[in-house]
Each structure stands twice: as structure tokens, then as C-alpha cells.
Image (cartoon, coloured by chain):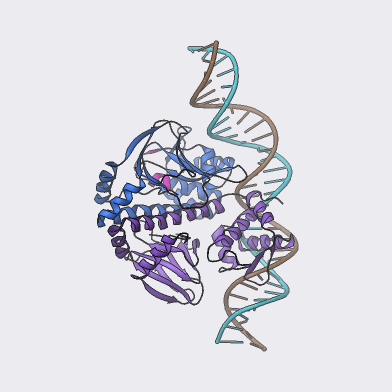
Chain colours: A purple, B blue, C brown, D cyan
Amino acid sequence: MHNLNHARSTSKKRDELIKTVDAIGTRKRCKRREEICVGYERTRSWHRLVSGAARRYSILPDGRRQITALFLPGDFFGCYLTGQDEGWVIEAINEGTIIIEYPASRIEALAAGDLIMARELFEVVFQAISALEEQVLTIVRGKAAEKVALFVLHLAEHPSIANAPIITLPLTRYDIADYLGVSPETVCRCFTDLKNRGVIRLPARRQIEIMNRGALENRAYQGVA
Amino acid sequence: MHNLNHARSTSKKRDELIKTVDAIGTRKRCKRREEICVGYERTRSWHRLVSGAARRYSILPDGRRQITALFLPGDFFGCYLTGQDEGWVIEAINEGTIIIEYPASRIEALAAGDLIMARELFEVVFQAISALEEQVLTIVRGKAAEKVALFVLHLAEHPSIANAPIITLPLTRYDIADYLGVSPETVCRCFTDLKNRGVIRLPARRQIEIMNRGALENRAYQGVA
DNA sequence: CGGATGATTGAAGGTTTTCAAATAAAGTGG
DNA sequence: CCACTTTATTTGAAAACCTTCAATCATCCG
């Protein structure tokens, strides 16, 4: 399995790669909550999210579900079979989320046929690993306030969002809580606290505006004002 | 960057892959705490841990350091350049840890030359992603007791350890705490508690014996006895 | 408009961290 | 090989933090 999330476009080569792989992909428009791929199916495939947002769940033995990844426009992710645990689902969050699906066999053929392409494809996967490690860093350490601040910062840095004055959250507070491993109420309190301190504004239910980036970074790395 | 950790040997093909890649790799014996690779260097490379253990740190802006991955015999990991954050180090934990280093360019050439090889190599990387997602699941949810129980279970399932009656920990309590995102004291208390309940034995400072696997699994998934 | 979902706030209770101290084991240099 | 230093482990108690439970409010959608 799994996700190549946050594999971000950086180079001219990446643009070429996308042009090439898009030729072998099929475009799909998803409804809200529509499954994009699940762990127990037997097809290996790569995906790229074009617009909207998607999330990856794991279903735990006790029935709870846990978000383990978040995908935004430009992110690659994969449904690959690695043998073991298969209790997960990737689903579209928003109505109208658009993804492109590439058969893994075609991707592999692409890599096998061209050294440059092989390198670029590995780069995509390594960026995904890098993003996951960043996620580990976000959720593993520190107080809830630090996690929330880091989450906002990472979101703001995503290529599909960067430079936008106002961030539109693709997730509910519950989803964010699930993603960060804290309770929804705590997430809410952290947002409120940041707002009260003038670090962020909350113009609408699903929107954040960063007013003081330095203060936000301070919170992210120390939890102290 | 980064890690292809816990990419586990499963198939006959994997054995063939290892034989092939070992031909282009260089073997290295590491001292305790010796750096295997760091984030800011400019060489892309893959690695496989043959014996011993290694860990991956991130150095945070405030100076703290955080373990984001653990490598055991058979695990692949990569030092790849993805552009952004480079504040990490992979280092050997034990004296005499042996790794094999493969230049990324040779790996890519291998993939580009052979479809089967390309597929196997992607499989390795996807397994690494899978393992990272499992790590996210371990650290994100539940009480400290659940995390510790899951950690022990995952360790016990690792191919390099599986079926051994007694698990030898490659990490200190501090490392485990760092890895799980809890304090060392809490890790200690969890171990003590598991011992008192007869779920595990602690024959020596760095050894664990699972006495009641079912009870351990119960703890891992519910935190309840 | 009404129902459902999501967001927010308060208060009580439970966990975990932090601080402090004691003990044990391992490594060092003589 | 021993004394000494350093590192690692363990336990206790208080404080900080987060979760849970409950209730209220807002928003979206039909």
C-alpha cells in the first residue's frame, strides 16, 4: 500500500513527469465521502489529487477509525499491496474532488523505460516519505497547542495553499483532532486561544488567516508565547 | 530524504533483489552513535541494515531532538534529497552495526533497466511508507499503555526478531519514550505495570519476554485489562 | 422551517508530565 | 581489578494538561 502524500511539485521536471503520467491516467470526479481506494482490493495503483481534498483512514480492531493522512491538490498517493494490514480506506472529503488514477504497472513500465523518469518517480515517493515523517514529528511531540500550530503552518506551506491570505480548511475540527491525536474540543480551544492572542483570525467556520506568523512558529516549537 | 524503514523481506523476489543490489553496495561497520547519513549532505543513497540497529533523529528548531524512525536488520532506508527540511540524522545505535550503502543513481539505473526490478524497488519503498503509517497509528492514538503495548507487539513481529522467545531491546527507555511521544518515566511505569500483571517479564534491563500475548493485544487496542 | 452536523465553552475527572531522589549498571582511568 | 564517573532505570508526589460529559450555539441543507 499506501500514500505518497504531499509529494509536492517543485521542479520543471516534475511538470514533465505529470504531463507524462497523466497520459496513462484516468480522471475521476468524486462525491463527498466517496471511496477512492481501499486496503483489501487487489489492484496496485498510483493517484494524484487534482482538486478538492482526501483523507486516509485506518479502521482499528476495536472499531474506531483514525485519520493517518491528508491529501491536497498536487499530492500523489498510492494503493499498493505490501502484504500485511489492509484495514484502511482513502476517501474524498469534498464533493467534486478530482483525482487521476494511474495503473501501477504502467508507472513501473515508465520507470523501467527511462532513467530520468525512474529517478523522478522515486523522488515523488521519497517526498511522500518525507511528508509522513513530518507528520510524525507533528503528532508525536509537545502539547496540543504546538500540534495545532504546526498543523496550521504545514497547511499554509502546502503548494496548493501557499501565498493565499486566507486558508480554507478542508477538514472539520473532528478530522483535525483525529489527525493530530487530540480531542475535537481541545483543537477548538487551541484555535480560540490563538485567535484571542491575535495570532490568527477565524473569518468563517472553515477559514483561517494567519496574522502573526512568528508568534505561530513560537507556539509550534515551544508552546510558549 | 528519507527512510524506507521496516521494508521487510517477504518473497523469493525480495531475496533476488537483495542479491542484485548488494552487488552495487558497499558494506560498512559502524561504531556506537556513528552517523550513517545526515539531511544536509548532497548525496542520494539507499541503505540496508544488516545487523545491529539504527535510529533517525530530527533536530527541532528549539534544539530538542526527536526520534522519527527505528531500523532493524533487514530494513531499507534512504537518504534522498527532497528539497526542504534537512534537520535530521540517521545513526547507528549499537557498536558493530553493519549497513550496506547503495548509490541512488545505481538503484535508479537498476530500476530503469528491468521491469521486475522496478516493481520490486517500488514495493520496498511502499512497504516503508506502510510502516511509517503504522507508526503514525501507534503514536497518535490512545493512552501511553496502549502505545507501549503496540510498540512491543510491533517489535516482536519484526522479521529479525520474530519467534525469538526473548526480545532484546535495541533502545533505551528514553529512546522508546522519544519514539512514542511520552516521557521516559511513563514508559517505565507502563513496563512495570505490564510486568506486575504477568503480561511480560523483564529478565534484564534491555530484555522483554512476552508471557501473555492476548493480554498484550488487549492493552494495545483498548488500554483495558 | 426543522433536522442534522459542526463548533464552542464549562466543569469534573483522569492521565501524563515534571521535578526530585534513589538505585543500578556500565564505562573509565588509574 | 577497583574506585569513580557517567548513564540508565525506577519510584513517588504535585502540578499541568487533556479528555470526557454536557449543554449551547451556529450553520448548512433539504
What residue is at 66 percent from the left and 57 percent from the top?
A213
B165 vs A184, nearest the viewer: A184
Q: Quadrant of residue A156?
A: bottom right
Magenta extent: B154-166
Report the side of A132 relative to C17 (left or right).
Answer: left
Q: Which residue lies at the image location 58% right of the left edge and 49% below the top edge? A: A141
Q: Is residue A71 above or below residue A118?
A: below
Task: Name which residue lies at 36% across and 67% down.
Answer: A21
Quadrant of the frame with the N terminus of chain A: bottom left
Q: Where residue B7 appears, x then y in whole percent?
A: 36, 49
Relative image position of residue A34 (x, y in whole percent): 45, 74
- B94 drawn magenta: no
In the rendered image, residue B160 lying in the magenta stretch gets the answer yes
What residue is shown at x 24% (from left), y 47% (from top)?
Answer: B16
Q: Main secondary structure of the magenta part?
A: loop
In this rendered view, identify the residue nearer to me: B40 or A26: B40
Task: Estimate the x, y position of residue B195 in percent, counting from the top left.
Answer: 50, 40
Using the rendered image of the protein, determine whether residue A203 is visible from the camera's viewpoint: yes
How far from the left and from the top, in percent, is residue A76?
43, 63
Q: Quadrant of residue B20?
A: top left
